[in-house]
Image (tube, helix red, strand yellow):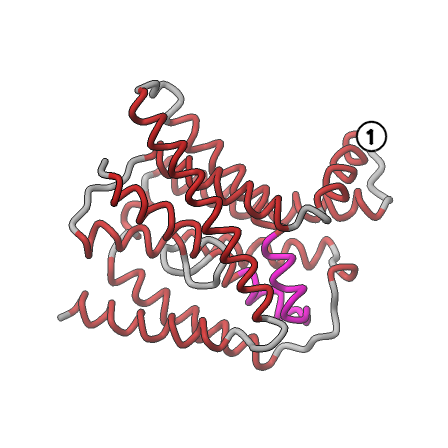
Amino acid sequence: MSLFHLFLVAIIQGLTEFLPVSSSGHLVLLPHLAGFKDQGLAIDVAVHVGTLFAVMIFFRADMPMIWRGCLDLLRMRMQTRDGRFALALGIATIPVVVAGLVLHVTGASDALRSVAVIGWSMLIFGLVLYWADQRGSTAKTGNDWTLRDALIMGLWQAVALIPGTSRSGITITGARVLGYDRREAARLAMLMSIPTIAASGLVLGMDVATEADPGVIRDAALAAALAFGAALLALRLMMHFLERVSYTPYVIYRVVLGAILLIYAYG
């Protein structure tokens, strides 16, 4: 794998994992449009690990609450604030894990990795994000996150297994429909990514556990570092701009890219 290809994969994954523009869609498009071979599972695992560490570092103020909550759950103390939040995170993760395992085992996910599917997903779910952002109220904060809301957002998150949908975008959409303000919707979506990315990385990691080639390990380490830096930058930019603008710029990007991809797919 060339250094340039590795750089592109890591930067694209890092920048788009947390922006509502679909990292998986961009990564599927890369070999289609640039003529590269698929980067392989080892690199996929590496960039997932890089983005996982990025979100944990960026939301480091929330991490002690999550760790305490996990300990409370182990002690069956679900009535504490931290325990309820950790339980909500777990519930929000179940739908995407179940759906992901079904797609992984059946191989159905390969049928979705087409330019046409990504184009339609970019366009449709971009417009859905715009609709939800414009009509959604701003009454709720993270302290109002209930188990019911967590399950609903988890079901929205499962839709992101369709390439081009965007995990962060569709989860933010669900949060805005439920009435969370823009910043809290993004924060909850990012915190939901921690167990989701960890579960995805674990499944993919099991598939590449036998790979011990030094070249692959070197490439994976570099990809993880690049994805970490790019993801941290993307998180800082998005959370900063949410204080001044809506999600509309991301919607415009999605609609334009979706239209271009559909023209390419059917042209």
Q: Are there few (<14), some (14-19), or many (20+) residues within 10 Å of tag 1?
A: few
> Residue 33 lies in what quarter of the image?
bottom left
Question: Where is residue 15 drawn, in percent x and y?
Answer: 43, 55
Which amino acid type corresponds to the residue marked 1 in the rendered image?
Arg
> Residue 156 lies in what quarter of the image?
bottom right
Q: Is residue 245 above or below residue 228?
A: below
Rendered-image quadrant of the N terminus: top left
Furthest residue toward left: 267
Q: What residue is disc 1 on?
A: 75
Question: Where is residue 47 drawn, in percent x and y?
Answer: 42, 41
- Choose between 82 and 120: the one closer to the eye: 82
Q: Is residue 189 magenta?
A: yes
Question: Where is residue 44 drawn, in percent x and y?
Answer: 37, 39
* Residue range of the region highlighted in magenta in the rendering: 171-190
Question: Where is residue 82 drawn, in percent x and y?
Answer: 80, 45
| Numbered disc 1: secondary structure | loop
- Choose between 56 and 20: the one closer to the eye: 56
Rendered-image quadrant of the C terminus: bottom left
